Amino acid sequence: MTIKPGWFMALLLSMTPVVQAAPETFSQPITTPSSLRAEPDIDPAAPVRNALSTFSEIAPPPGNFTLLGTRTQGQIEFGVRSDEVVTKAVLNLTFRPSPSLIPSLSHLKVYLNDELAGLVPITAEELGKTSQVQVPIDPRLIGDFNRIRLELVGHYANICENPANSAIWLEIGKASTLEMALQKLPVKNDLSHFPEPFFDARESRPLSLPMIFAAAPDVGEQRAAAVLASWFGTKADWRGQTFPVLYNALPEKQHAVVFATNDKRPDFLKTLPPVDKPTVEMIDRPGNPYQKLLLILGRDDNDLLTAVQGIAQGEILLRGETSTIDSVKSLAARQPYDAPNWVRTDRATTFGELQQFRGQLQADGMQPGPIALTLKLPPDLFLVRARGIDMDIKYRYTSPVQDDGSRLAVNLNDQFVQDYALTTKREEGKQLLRIPLVQGLLDNGTRLTIPALQLGVVNQLRFDFDYASTFIGGTYNNTTSEGRCETITPVTNHVVIDPNSTVDFSGYRHYMEMPSLGAFASAGFPFSRNADLAQTLVLVSDRPEPGKVSALLNALGNISAQTGYPALKVQMTDDWSKAKEYDADLLMIGTLPAAMRGDDKVNLLVEAAKSWVNKPNRQAAFSGGSSSPDDRRAESQTTISSAAPVAALVGFQSPFAAQRSVVALLADSPQAWTLLNGALTDSGKRAAIFGSASVIRDSGVSSLRVGETYWVGHLPWYERLWNALASHPVLLALFAAVVVVVFALLVWRLMQRVSRHRLGDEDDRE
């Protein structure tokens, strides 16, 4: 792998002037003086691509931010692939400054990786108005992972300023963009850098990795490809992933994966020698050394499966142009609900286990930014009427100058939960090194109960340290003869959430109403119950069309991206008669088997997604809503015919086991498979999938809750009874009345027995 050119020291860099002009078209690499040219020299014939990233894509949500006198900095982050180098970069800023700023004193500083990259002066004509400016970025400052930091130097008065004054602000618009020209670098055929260049963690774009077969793949080839796609899904994680499928063809301008056995190979691999073991090899694309092919080779389908299992469980051992997989052994079986990306449910989870990057649990500044953690939960955690989730938090912070109302606010999914006062230091400073000395952590302050009903599959826990304005500035001292202005410069505050803080989801049962396509779209449930999909059977077609195979790969890639573990144990068949032999949840790709087409319950869902629909009596407005059987009862039926493509997802109970589920991905044409794959790979469309049937059209996704529901998981009978009664207030009232009557009868009978006993004693005395 070629190493990215090193950048010159900052002392060699000259200030780049700011240019306000229309953006250029990046078609050729830039030319620089020979003394400053990056090394090694770039081949002028190497491919160049232009990348345009908006702040809505690379800045923290919502994509725009406002710089204040107390929060003067904002930033964006971006990465550059290891097989590319930036030859030209321009930051196109859209901003609006406060009309109260003084132009001669106010400006915006642009830093790239803590090096001053440019200055944006604020003119009198720009005050209070939306303006655009181009800031050229020296590409020699750009590395693998980069941070552009914008810092406001804002002044509204020449003397006696208060940095907390609301007149100091500058808003950066989400229409701002970063424009780069990237040129390809030659890459050695060396698997020691794998998964690069096929997946590069520096890139924030969704992964797009074509999968190539000699012809329509059989079941064994599909399973091998699905396992590899799921592993790449774990790498792509939040970025998203898509796997286009090609038969005996090469993609344009993309790296790709090729599956081939000794007797079944694409035409461009006909001259490749046969292999005698599962083999992984990296080669140049024929005629293009800048594109790479990852070859998964074997004598038969079993070898292909062994090769991808070796990649998924031993990629750190890959090296050189070619590696052979000698053996893959499973040493221990995974347990249900142990997905690496999910919060532990068998014990308390520390914040350190949830941390995704260095420095995530700390912040700095006069007003420190929020500290956020993501909590991913199994969808079937039964938290209804739960006592709440216990969280033990430990935190450290710079003490306020005085008890001025500074507080720590805890928010869950943008909803306020609780707050704690940030108090001044104790007088006994000798206890400063003890964690318990932090005020708000003692006694009752150490436990926080999260309202369980606010939780979903993916949850955002946020800690906001809000310091009151304690600035002493902008005051004119009239008591002195000099009449001077006295200002105290505020210090930076430091806040830390201790990694040993815990959140405890243990002790809760797994019980959920099904079907729930929302759980499938957001967490891969019920298949993700076992992270390795050990209890999943996928029903596929033999010799399928490319769109159908792509749907299989995208579906399993999505599931593993949510769990963080590849589908190593997934089973696959094209024979429906074998499905009843497995105690497994079923994922169907394509059409329903003939044996199921006569099932009225299944037909209701399938036809609802194709030509006619039973409109529910009352439809929930969003996927998180619940509905009763009365609401799901059909109010009307509409039949519509059309030649336009339509795709659908349907969910229903397995005909072979009450605790098992079926999810079917259906499409009626190649165009429909394109729609379905677009929905599977688009996070916005996946969010619109819920209920028991989702129809995918050119206009988007429409979901319905129709048909019967069932429950999966375990709940003791008394808890099920209480859950049923709590869902039906009338029944609960009748049950309470019956309990009162029965209790009254028991008390009456008891009092009668006591009375007879006393009368009997009196008769005996007489």
Image (cartoon, rainbow, N blue to C red):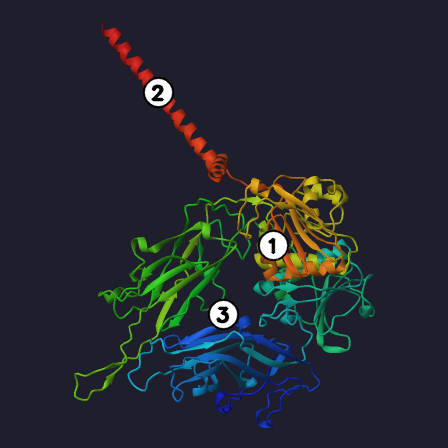
Closest to the observer, 424 or 9: 424
Q: Mark 1 sits on what residue?
A: 689
Looking at the image, which residue is at 49% across and 88% down? 10
Q: CA distance from mark 2 to mark 3?
A: 68 Å
Q: Mark 2 sits on what residue?
A: 748
Q: Mark 3 sits on what residue?
A: 60
Q: CA distance from mark 1 to mark 2?
A: 56 Å
Where does the image place residue 540, in percent across and percent down from the top left? 73, 52
Check the picture and name the quadrant holding the N terminus.
bottom right
Name the amino acid type tagged 3. Answer: Pro
> In this rendering, would 457 be left or right of 678?
left
Check the picture and name the quadrant holding the C terminus.
top left
Q: Earlier in the sequence, mark 3 or mark 1?
A: 3
Residue 163 appears anywhere in the view: yes
Where does the image place residue 121, in percent across and percent down from the top left? 45, 87
Name the amino acid type tagged 2. Answer: Trp
Q: Earlier in the sequence, mark 1 or mark 2?
A: 1
Where does the image place residue 729, in percent across and percent down from the top left? 46, 37
Say the numbered circle drawn on residue 670: none
Q: CA distance from mark 3 to mark 1?
A: 26 Å
Q: Secondary structure at mark 1?
A: loop
Closest to the observer, 319 or 602: 602
Query: On the image, which quarter does residue 324 sit in?
Result: bottom right
